[in-house]
Image (cartoon, rainbow, N blue to C red):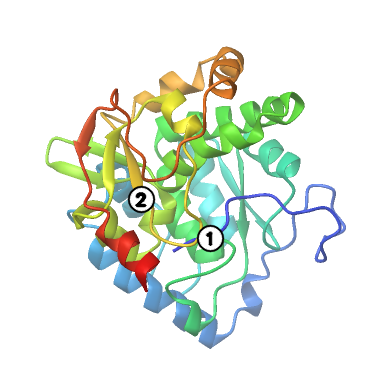
């Protein structure tokens, strides 16, 4: 489970010398123990991909230089990505400021944490590490639709910062890129990195009866708060990945105005106008509140 999205508060430590916050990955400095942690995570997640991950994710995994025995080299990943969709992976020390994050995305550079979680953090981490960023995100960057959508999100994020509407746009990223589901002919599938890189949320999001699963609607999503401390109470489902291309060409200014005038929605709240694909029992989160 992932607790963070992006952005680093001003004044926090760890800022590199480069204005874009990039650092060398230092692949040769990973220890055998760190490669072993990657192997544990990689093997248990790849076992869950059949029947859970969408076709685009599975295809991306097959065509990238990803292996169980070692943390990937960002240079090799970038060589393949550049040929397919014009993207590359750049190393950063962790969370970066919003404007830096968006600028990288707008230029088709995906900023990835180059550190890996500790063995006791296999199922929960406060900020994205190399497993979340590479295993979770990079396979979908091999898909032209997602590649264009993420670039458009970076461009839109820079505009949202200027307009003071970043929280609204961040919810779109959270409920698509991080925790999005898509309907395929053979069933409900994962495309969001926060789910794909988490063993427990992979099973919860697709199979559990507790969460709501609601058809994606942009302004509905922009109004909806999300969970950073637990599984999501509601997952928004695309009819097909091409819906992301539609979002990439929308002028968000009007949506910001309409959504800003409407009340925020709690993570598990359902509306009369929702196209509810599965009405969740809420059992999981109710049990947590009662504990």
- Observer-nearest residue: 52 or 83? 52
State the SS at label 1: loop
On the image, the x and y values in percent for residue 63 come to 36, 50
On screen, residue 270 versus residue 146, left or right, reads left
Q: Looking at the rendered structure, which numbered label has been put on residue 3?
A: 1
In percent of the image, x 55 and y 64: which residue is there? 130
Q: Local crowd at mark 2 within 10 Å, few (<14), some, or many (≥20)?
A: many
On screen, residue 23 versus residue 48, left or right, reads right
Q: Earlier in the sequence, mark 1 or mark 2?
A: 1
Q: Looking at the rendered structure, which numbered label has been put on residue 87?
A: none
- Could you say which quadrant of the image residue 235 lies in? top left
Q: Nearer the viewer, mark 1 or mark 2?
A: 2
- Observer-nearest residue: 198 or 267? 267
In percent of the image, x 67 and y 61: which residue is there? 94
State the SS at label 2: loop
On the image, the x and y values in percent for residue 169 come to 57, 32
Residue 74 in sight from this viewpoint:
yes
Q: Which residue is mark 2?
A: 233
């Amino acid at each position: 489970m992932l607790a963070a999205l992006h952005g680093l508060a001003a004044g926090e430590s760890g800022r590199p010398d480069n204005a874009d916050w990039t650092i060398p990955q230092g692949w040769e400095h990973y220890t055998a123990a760190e490669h072993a942690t990657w192997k544990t995570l990689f093997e248990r997640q790849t076992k869950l991909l059949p029947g859970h991950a969408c076709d685009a994710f599975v295809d991306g995994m097959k065509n990238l230089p990803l292996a169980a025995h070692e943390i990937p080299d960002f240079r090799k990943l970038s060589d393949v990505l550049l040929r397919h969709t014009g993207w590359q992976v750049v190393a950063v020390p962790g969370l970066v400021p919003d404007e830096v994050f968006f600028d990288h995305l707008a230029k088709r550079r995906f900023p990835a944490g180059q550190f890996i979680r500790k063995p006791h953090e296999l199922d929960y981490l406060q900020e994205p590490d190399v497993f979340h960023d590479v295993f979770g995100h990079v396979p979908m960057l091999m898909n032209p639709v997602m590649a264009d959508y993420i670039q458009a999100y970076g461009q839109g994020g820079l505009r949202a910062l200027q307009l003071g509407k970043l929280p609204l746009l961040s919810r779109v990223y959270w409920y698509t890129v991080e925790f999005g589901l898509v309907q395929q002919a053979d069933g409900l599938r994962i495309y969001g990195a926060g789910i794909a890189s988490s063993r427990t949320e992979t099973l919860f999001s697709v199979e559990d009866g507790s969460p709501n699963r609601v058809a994606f609607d942009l302004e509905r999503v922009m109004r909806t708060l999300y969970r950073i401390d637990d599984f999501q109470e509601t997952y928004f489902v695309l009819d097909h990945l091409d819906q992301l291309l539609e979002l990439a060409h929308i002028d968000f200014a009007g949506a910001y105005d309409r959504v800003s005038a409407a009340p925020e929605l709690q993570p598990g709240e359902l509306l009369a106008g929702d196209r509810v694909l599965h009405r969740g029992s809420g059992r999981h989160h109710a049990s947590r509140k009662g504990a």
